[in-house]
Image: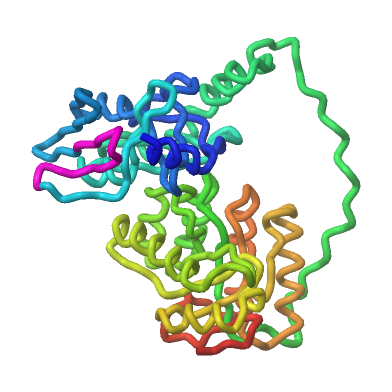
Amino acid sequence: MLCAVLMILMLPAPARALTLTAVNDTLLPLDDSTMPQRLGGELYVPYSVFSSLGVSSSLEGGVLSMSSNGETLNFSLDEGYVYDQNLNSYTSPAYNMNGTVYVPVTLCCGKFGLGYSTISVAGETVLRVTDGTAQSDSSFASSKSGEIESAINTYRGNPDASSDPQVQPETPPAPEEPPIPEVEEEPAQKPAHVYLAFYGAPTANTPAVLDELDSAGRLATFFLPTDVSTWTDDTIRRIVAEGHTPALLLDADSSAAAEDLVASLAAANERLALLTGVSTRIVSNQDGCAALTEAQRDALVAAGYRLWDAALDSGDATQSAARAYATTAQRFASTDATLVVQLHHSRTTAQTVQSLAAYMSRQGIPSSRITLSNTPINGAGDTR
């Protein structure tokens, strides 16, 4: 009993960023008993979430049994063990919190043939569990935006301005911006090669970015955070299916243990392989590879990873598409080196990509995705 109490006390505080849960195309009521929790580094939901997806459950004698399609998981709440019908054991236990039993999303979905994704809708994050019959994440986000925003306002006790036509939010005056620079159509020089690299987790804007890349016939590299809870599964699958390179993005400084960095990449690769059938050895760091120590870089290279950094930020995350395009094109005209251009998943990214791709075509600037055979480019000068 003492061990059980200590284990509960040592659990990290549940992350509140994931505030809603959806099953297929249905948004669950928003209250404390349905919100996903992050426990021991994994996503958890109440076991009842799986009931409407054909998973039967029973809770007797402190053991929760879940079954579907001949597969079974048995969770002992008191002893913390979990095993399946073949007596295979697993390391992700169930937790009883405030009378609600939470089960690990990754384990349950994998065992019962279900899928899950996390998507950004109306400024909040939704954990969505599906059985393959639901609409795409992008369609769900588009159709449920108003419902989610209303649920959030109700939960927080905020008045829903959209329900009262008399209440209109004040629009502050737009700040004056300096004029957008002109783009040189006959530059004296231009990059020898460009790698378009998208940093961060996919958002509702990413499908439009992929559409523009497809229209332009350009392949790119997508650096995905090692925190797989931020991934949108359908979009990850599409990135790989359309020929782009999936890569991984660390968020580390010199104090991180080298073995922890390797372990986080391995865990993310496991999820990537589960979703797409491929893994990756291309890695970047949020603050640049120069922020890592030589020992950290040695450990990553020894584990088979190659380190990359972007040399140029397009500005699409903070600027209008027209300004991001113009300033990036200006930088293109000032170098004949090979460039890694950092882009994101913002509202302006798709338009920025369209304009940049058209400019690169006019100037004959080649681009490609990063592959393992390419010599790495990074701020640490580590070309291994």
Find residue 74 and report its horizontal and vertical position in percent: 19, 37
Relative to 285, residue 174 above or below:
above
Relative to 313, residue 290 above or below:
below
Q: How many numbered marks are there?
A: 0
Report the magenta residues as a range. Answer: 74-86
For the residue pair 316 and 74, the one nearer the viewer reads as 74
Q: Which residue is rendered at x = 28% and y = 45% of the image?
A: 107
Q: Does 86 sit left or right of 311 as displayed? A: left
For the residue pair 310 and 225, the one nearer the viewer reads as 225
Q: Quarter of the image holding residue 76? A: top left
Q: Which residue is rendered at x = 35% and y = 57% of the image?
A: 271
Q: Does 88 sit left or right of 301 as displayed? A: left
Q: Does 278 sit left or right of 255 as displayed? A: left
Q: Which residue is rendered at x = 60% and y = 36% of the image?
A: 123
Find residue 257 and report its horizontal and vertical position in percent: 54, 70
For the residue pair 204 and 177, the one nearer the viewer reads as 204
| Extreme-front residue of the structure | 2
Relative to 307, residue 85 above or below:
above
For the residue pair 222 and 303, the one nearer the viewer reads as 303
- Is residue 75 something one can see in this rendering? yes
Find residue 273 and report its horizontal and vertical position in percent: 31, 62
Q: Does 4 sit left or right of 161 as displayed? A: left
Question: Does the magenta portion include 283?
Answer: no
- Is residue 138 something one can see in this rendering? no
What colour scheme has been applied to the protein in the rendered image?
Answer: rainbow
Relative to 368, residue 251 above or below:
above
Q: Which residue is rendered at x = 49% and y = 33% of the image?
A: 142
Find residue 303 and report its horizontal and vertical position in percent: 41, 79
Question: Does the magenta portion include 77?
Answer: yes
